Image (cartoon, rainbow, N blue to C red):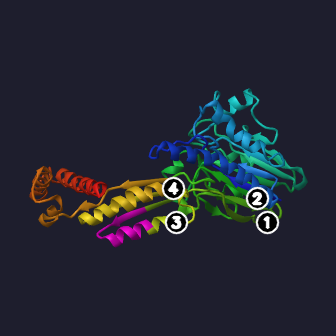
């Protein structure tokens, strides 16, 4: 018997640091990935997909957002999708799950598990699902504790599904809300405990696993296993499950920290590093660059062209923290002409920069913009 384990779809999630075009692409891909999960289940011969909470980002999504994931799952009538609430979409009286049931929006192949009780998962394999159900965003009690005493037939394959933070795994502050005992699988006789809440893959032990989100949604989780699902194969109720990780995400998020630029070669190398993430599909890249350093006038213009313009146009999102400064001296002023208002303004700004003080940084930025704009004027005239 096989299942697909996924979690944290966060349908309806917003990203404040991207433009409208990129936001639309990111939100669409959080829906498109459901189809890739369904295709993976078919490919692997898994009749069941467990979604361990946070199907939705908010408790009050729009009508369209509420129904969209249901319609994606409806397309895979040969697969049963099992959903539980998470901390973002807890089972509250007027929440998403109540709305779905009230509006008869749940397809026949989708099962909402809203009560903490054993449910027959697969009769042919005597497999039972034990869901933990969040009825509020945060709870201080372990909602998986009931599993220890939950009755199932003799020899049953017991599979738990929960959304929360495992206690005692180096995350004490995070585990203050929705705590899960680290040994729950052993105490409850579970063949597997499918976890949700952490957005990167994490295997706590042989039988307790976080799948991570199937489409990465933040900088930092890509290296920890975000953007994938887990296929779990069972050989029996007591045998350790066999896990295989499968990439399902389209977008790749990377953060480059402490990038110091001092030359044109550094700028070209930086552009190459970012493009090398996905050389054939740069539109799948979201890059966050922490940039500093000092550049000459020509190199600063190169930075503006290669990074600010060309690279930004190639990738889905280019997020910049910091900017290289201008290393300009008196000799650089000659490119502005021997005299005139532009030259006089640059000379005054350079004096302020060299004097230091509170206004030096503002003068430095103004001088930098002046050189860049002057360069634009010259290129346009040419």
Residue closest to the eye, 243 or 306: 306
> Percent position (x, y) of residue 232?
75, 60
Which residue matches tag 1? 239
Q: Is mark 1 in CB contact (under 8 Å) with mark 2?
A: yes
Q: Are marks 1 and 3 in contact (CB under 8 Å)?
A: no
CB atoms of marks 1 and 4 within 8 Å? no
Closer to the chain start, of discs 1 and 4, is 4
User: Is residue 293 in view?
Assistant: no
- Residue 118 placement, left or right of 320: right
**Disc number lying in front (2 or 3):** 3
Q: Earlier in the sequence, mark 4 or mark 2?
A: 4
Of circles 1 and 3, the one toward us is 3
Residue contact at pointers 2 and 3, CB within 8 angstroms: no
Left or right of 288, for residue 106: right
- Residue 324 - label: none
Tell me what residue is drawn at x 14 percent, y 63 percent. 334
Identify the element where label 2 is drawn: loop
Residue that appears at 74% across and 57% down: 40
Q: What residue would you read off at disc 2?
A: 191
Specify whether residue 264 is painted magenta: yes
Residue at the extreme bottom:
265
Q: Quick check: 140 left or right of 239?
A: left
Question: Which of pointers 1 and 2 lies earlier in the amino acid sequence?
Answer: 2
Q: Tell me the magenta residue range.
A: 256-271
| Residue annotated with mark 4 | 171
Q: In the visual, does 297 lie left or right of 110? A: left
């Amino acid at each position: 018997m096989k299942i697909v384990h996924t979690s944290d779809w966060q349908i309806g999630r917003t990203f404040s640091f991207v433009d409208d075009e990129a936001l639309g692409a990111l939100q669409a891909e959080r829906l498109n990935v459901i189809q890739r999960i369904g295709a993976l289940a078919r490919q692997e011969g898994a009749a069941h997909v467990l979604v361990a909470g946070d199907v939705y980002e908010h408790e009050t999504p729009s009508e369209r957002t509420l129904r969209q994931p249901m319609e994606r799952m409806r397309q895979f009538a040969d697969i049963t999708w099992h959903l539980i609430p998470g901390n973002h979409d807890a089972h509250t009286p007027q929440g998403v799950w109540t709305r779905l049931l009230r509006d008869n929006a749940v397809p026949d192949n989708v099962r909402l598990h809203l009560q903490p009780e054993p449910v027959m998962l697969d009769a042919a394999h005597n497999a039972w699902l034990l869901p933990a159900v969040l009825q509020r965003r945060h709870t201080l009690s372990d909602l998986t504790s009931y599993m220890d005493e939950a009755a199932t037939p003799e020899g049953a394959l017991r599979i738990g599904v929960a959304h929360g933070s495992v206690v005692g795994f180096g995350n004490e502050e995070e585990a203050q809300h929705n705590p899960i005992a680290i040994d729950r699988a052993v105490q409850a006789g579970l063949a597997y405990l499918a976890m949700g809440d952490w957005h990167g893959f994490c295997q706590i032990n042989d039988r307790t696993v976080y799948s991570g989100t199937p489409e990465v949604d933040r900088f930092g989780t890509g290296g920890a296993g975000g953007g994938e699902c887990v296929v779990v194969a069972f050989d029996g109720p007591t045998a350790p499950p066999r896990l295989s990780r499968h990439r399902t995400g389209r977008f790749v998020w990377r953060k480059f920290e402490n990038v110091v630029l001092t030359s044109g070669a550094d700028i070209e190398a930086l552009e190459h590093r970012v493009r090398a993430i996905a050389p054939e599909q740069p539109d799948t890249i979201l890059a966050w660059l922490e940039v500093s350093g000092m550049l000459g006038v020509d190199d600063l213009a190169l930075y503006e062209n290669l990074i600010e313009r060309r690279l930004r146009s190639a990738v889905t999102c280019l997020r910049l923290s910091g900017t290289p400064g201008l290393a300009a001296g008196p000799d650089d002023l000659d490119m502005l002409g021997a005299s005139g208002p532009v030259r006089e303004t640059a000379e005054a700004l350079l004096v302020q920069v060299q004097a230091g003080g509170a206004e030096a940084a503002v003068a430095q930025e103004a001088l930098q913009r002046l050189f860049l704009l002057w360069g634009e004027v010259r290129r346009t005239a040419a």
